[in-house]
Amino acid sequence: MSDRDYGNFTGLSKQALGVLRVNAVIQCGVLILLSLLLLFTPLEKVISLIIILFILVICAVYFFKITVFRHRRYKYRITDDRIDIVEGVFFVSHTIVPVDRIHQVEIAYGPIDNRFGVAKVIVTTAGSRAVLRFLEREIASQIAERLNDMIRERLEAARTVGGTGTASSMFGDLDGFGGDGNV
Amino acid sequence: MFKKPARNHPSIIFERLAAFWGFVIIMFVSEAFNKLLSGESMIFSAAYWRSFFYMLKAGNLKVLLSGTGLFLVCSVVIVISFLIWRKTFFFISDGVLCVERRTIFKKLSKLPASNISTVNIERNLFERLIGTAKVKVDINSSTTSEQTDFTFVLKLELAEILKEELIKAKGGEEADPQSYGYSAKPALSSQPKTIISFSPIKVITHQLLSIPFAQVVLALITFLPAFLDDADYAYEYYAGASGDKTVLVLLIVIGAVLSVVRSVFQNWNFTLSKEGGNIYIKRGLIRTSSVVFEADKINGVIIKQSLLARLFGLYSVEAAVIGLTTQKDKTPVLSLLTTKAEAERVLNECAPFYKTEAELIPCSKKSLVPYMLAAAIACLISLPVFFVPIEFIWISFVAIAIFSFFLAYMSYRTKALGFDERLVKIVSGILVRKTVLINHSDIQQIDINSNFIVKRFGIARSKVMILSANAQKVHGTGYFDFALLNEIAGRITAAKDALSTVRRSGYEQKV
């Protein structure tokens, strides 16, 4: 699959954009406050002001453009055998977690997430951790529930057939994963 | 044995406080010594202690920082440690290792023996002197991969018995308490078969050939100019600065030699053996270590060749296993530098599942673009050297440019990737050539990373993550076509989780 081929992927909701914007405001706020400290240094006032102006421009671009682009770029897909998460603006990261390796699924949300009604689903394997961010609360719990069902089914299948069950036999009859199994 | 609650050896109290004790003794001795020298042997009088406690009562807590104060604090710590030791018990019950602390903060930890990853015995000089040993128990968890989960200090014989009982409980066997007594050696079902052992000469050779080349070059670059100053300058400062430099270089050389000697001592008598499904590694001269882990717990194999080792055609083999915190670098070395045939034999004996005929695919030619771009950026960053008022400074810039582009080209040339229906093979490393072999079903996550430049060329880099200690957890590839990386990702996601029993049963069928 090429980077541009995201046919079956699901994007983020509008609430997610709100969270991204609040995060951007916090990050830019800290940066601007730090840059204002330049005014109290022995650096020439003009140079300080130029630097502050430059930071303000960058913050504006980050808030109005990059946040939107990041929101548009963030995509995820959950199929019978894998979870795909694509994120990043200049540096794009495509994380793939085999469903068969998942040991634990958690839902978490902070105060900003809470305000916008979004949550993150944290997927833990034996040696890694992946996070599906900015999901609507309801979708997050649906995903977590389905992944938990998958883990339970896998464990039961392993127990009944002595660990020789195949992936298809384990995930074939799951509800809510009709067709290609996308959420 | 160990069915009834047992205690650690009392030496654990002193061992755990060794550093603290050392500090306190120095403080106390120096104070007492000073006072005796100055004719004040007050510390042996009641008046001294009365005044001490009077000051303490008056709120002068600074007195606690004096040697006497520290002695008192330490006494309290010792008493507490003694009580903790007295109230801490461990036992094995129905295949479960239980550790119970009956102090104010009560705690009962239960570890099913089947979840134990490794049981190791370690002895430092102090323990060898008093005849004790540490039994270190690690579980197969990435969250505690950097620390030992349970440590017990026992008499050597008891330590061996505990180790044996835990291994038996792990395998679901019931240990026979009558089979050995306190003084008897544990009755191993059979003697492990030695696969490879290294003579002192081979250990020294391994250590010498493993000296990091980059470190040597860096040291030479840093210190050579000090000795290449022109004659007048050197003459002028002969007694001063140059003399200091010699001392500094000598200190560094001594440090490097001591580091090599320490590593040689660590690997002294290195022996790899196998018995059933267990792999045994024994090594060490002053501090001995004995490691046992199941061959099935290997989550990856790493074959390494340092630059010097490549000249002699020697290879070392490492295994990615979780829970070996007794290992300094957290990666058990299966074989020190040895010939290709011997390394292959070690692999065949210990990890036959990692044998692959997968053909290596070199890095995509398009990957030269990001590497060269990185080199160009390095050159741009070093442009300000032209403002340094030194004659022939441009030579430095040319050197940086040549080095950057050479590094970029070598980064492209040295990276390769291979895969078959079971394994992924990742080759990388300019100075130290590293070949990593990982079972598809051991890979926990794959990250495919691109950026706005490489995306245009349809290439990306990937990282695979396995269950291992941090040092061997993430393995990165060079730039390859998206299609190729996605094909590998597809194979990995389709493979069944290796932490179940499938891999082992599959392997047994194969063999």
Image (tube, rainbow, N blue to C red):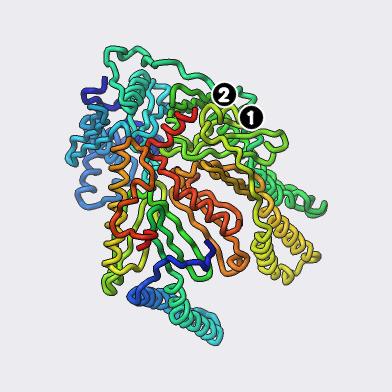
A57 lies above or below B450: below
The answer for which chain carries disc 1 is: B
Q: Residue furthest right?
A: B231
B195 lies above or below B328: above
Which residue is located at x 29 percent, y 38 percent?
Answer: A159
Which residue is located at x 43 percent, y 76 percent?
Answer: A67
Cβ atoms under marks 1 and 2 closer than 8 Å = yes
The answer for which chain carries disc 2 is: B
Whether residue B25 is visible, yes or no, is no
Left or right of A21, for residue B284: right
Inspect the image, locate mark 1, and give the three-letter code of the amino acid beneath it.
Thr
Is tag 1's residue or tag 2's residue first in the polypeptide sequence? 2
Q: What count of labels does the image hold? A: 2
Q: Residue furthest bottom?
A: A46
Query: Residue B254 placed where, x, y %?
Result: 63, 38
A172 lies above or below B101: below
Query: Residue B492 placed where, x, y %?
Result: 47, 48
- Give the structural element (helix, strand or loop) at label 1: strand
Badge 1 local density, few (<14 within 10 Å), some, or many (20+)?
many
Inspect the image, locate mark 2, and give the three-letter code of the amino acid beneath it.
Ile
Badge 2 local density, few (<14 within 10 Å), some, or many (20+)?
some
In this figure, which residue is indicated by the disc labeled 2? B196
Q: Observer-nearest residue: A61 or B47?
A: A61
In this figure, which residue is indicated by the disc labeled 1? B338
